[in-house]
Amino acid sequence: MAVNGGATKWNLKGIGYEYCNCQPGCTCNFSGFPTSSDGSCKAFVGNVIQSGRCGDVDLSNLTVAAIIDWPKAIHDGGGKAVFIVPPAVTDEQLGALAEIFTGKLGGMPWEILGSTYEVAGLVRSDIKVTEAGRHSSIEIPGVARAVGDTLKNPVTGADNNVDIELETGFIWKVGRCGQGSFEAEAEGIKLQYQDTNWIHYDFDWSN
């Protein structure tokens, strides 16, 4: 099935996990510029696709991830991305995901994000997501590890649960914020950050 312009119709719905090197809250999502120490945006993201389809290709019940390294703000481009998919993902599914995540089929957020990076590589590896809200974690053997936590009350140390509601958000509309730590290395990209931004969100994307 095609939409206007001949692009294949696609949709993805599920849970997203966004770890990056910004300060908690990640101002990139609402003011465009990172709050990292060097002005870069370096991220490890995971997507648990609960339901999805691209044309006749079923993308439901897939878990995928990416390591992305932008030298400046995302909209300045020049980024490099490494995508990770489990070995069980078929070539047909991989081809559909590649077209979506590089923005070739249009639709938000990938028609914007896909123009800001080049694909530096693909890794096939098992991806283990432990879903626990703001305490969620991701483990990819030999590739990446990410752990989420809540923000903390600076006086008592108690959990400080903060949500960002972003009416114009094109990646997510409600971000469940926290602080996270992650390390990831593949295809020449190596990232390691402690107690930086982490957002747990629901996504519903399509073209």
Image (tube, helix red, strand yellow):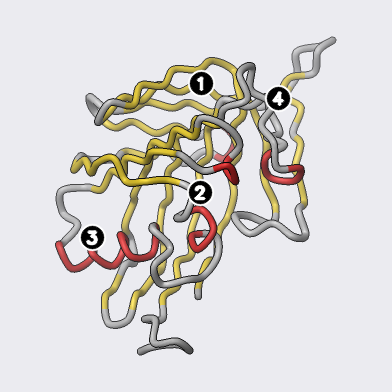
Amino acid type, callout 3: Leu
Mark identifier at residue 168: none
State whether residue 61 is above or below residue 38: below
Label 3: element kind: helix
Horizontal relation, residue 118 to residue 21: left or right: left
Residue labelled with disc 1: 181
Q: CA distance from mark 1 to mark 4?
A: 12 Å
Q: Which is nearer the N-term, disc 4 or disc 3?
A: 3
Q: CA distance from mark 1 to mark 2?
A: 16 Å
Q: CA distance from mark 4 to mark 3?
A: 36 Å
State whether residue 133 is above or below residue 188: below
Q: Are marks 2 and 4 in contact (CB under 8 Å)?
A: no
Camera-side residue: 188 or 126? 188
- Label 3 or label 1, whichever lies nearer to me, is 3
- Label 4 or label 3, whichever lies nearer to me, is 3
Amino acid type, callout 2: Gly
Amino acid type, callout 1: Ser
Residue 14's spot in the image, x, y percent? 48, 59
Residue labelled with disc 4: 151
Quarter occupied by residue 139: top left
- Label 1 or label 4, whichever lies nearer to me, is 1
Residue 197's spot in the image, x, y percent? 62, 28
Horizontal relation, residue 15 to residue 200: left or right: left
Label 4: element kind: strand
Label 2: element kind: strand
- Can residue 60 be seen? yes
Q: Are marks 1 and 2 in contact (CB under 8 Å)?
A: no
Mark identifier at residue 16: 2
Q: CA distance from mark 2 to mark 4?
A: 18 Å
Residue 168's spot in the image, x, y percent? 74, 60
Q: Badge 4 local density, few (<14 within 10 Å), some, or many (20+)?
A: many
